[in-house]
Structure formats: structure tokens, C-alpha cells
Image (cartoon, rainbow, N blue to C red):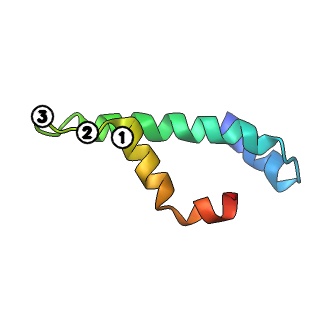
Amino acid sequence: MSDVTRILTAIEQGDAQATDELLPLVYQELRRLAAYKMANEPAGHTLQPTALVHEAWLSSPLKKSAG
């Protein structure tokens, strides 16, 4: 069982602290994906992977449910 699966199972069973474990894993994966995608951008672009992840989070409908 992967860490994410274990954490999601814990959340489903009502473990509120499991959310604190999940968010860093998701954030790390999103940054990795953003860096991969942005590696093909032309030289001189100014957006960094972290900023891209933050922008995606701010426009996410999940943000509203996370408080």
C-alpha cells in the first residue's frame, strides 16, 4: 500500500491528522510535475514551478473546501 493510499484510507476513516500528511505529498508531486512541464519552456520565462503550483491551488475549487 502506498503512502497516499494509506493516508486516504485514514482520512476516509475520520483521521483528521491524516490530511496534514497528505498535503505535503501532493504538493511535492505537483512541484515535480510543474518543473517537468516548465523545463520545455523557452529561455527567459519568469514563472517558477512553485509559483505555478501556488497559482493552480489559488484557482482550485478544492481551496474552498479546505478552508
Residue for point 43% across, 54% down: 56
Residue behind mark 3:
44
Residue 27 makes an appearance in the image: yes
Residue at point 62%, 65% (across, down):
64
The residue at the point 64 percent across, 41 percent down is: 23
Give me the C-alpha separation between circle 1 and circle 2: 6 Å
From what the image shows, is residue 50 above or below residue 12? above
- Quadrant of image for the C terminus: bottom right
Q: In the rendered structure, which amino acid carries the disc numbered 3?
A: Gly
Q: Is residue 59 above or below residue 50?
A: below
Asked which quadrant contains residue 1, the reply is top right
| SS at badge 1 | helix
Q: Is residue 40 left or right of residue 30?
A: left
Whole-angstrom CA distance, mark 2 to mark 3, is 12 Å
Q: Nearer the viewer, residue 4 or 32?
A: 32
Tag 2 secondary structure: helix
Image location (x, y in percent) of residue 4: 67, 40
Q: Percent position (x, y) of residue 50?
A: 41, 37
**Count of numbered badges drawn on the protein:** 3
Q: Would you say the residues marked 1 and 2 are in contact, meaning their CB atoms lie under 8 Å apart?
A: yes
Q: Which residue is mark 1?
A: 34
**Foreground of the two, 31 or 52:** 52
**Label 2 vs 3, first from the N-terminus:** 2
Q: Which residue is mark 2?
A: 38
Q: Nearer the viewer, residue 34 or 48?
A: 48
Identify residue type, mark 2: Met
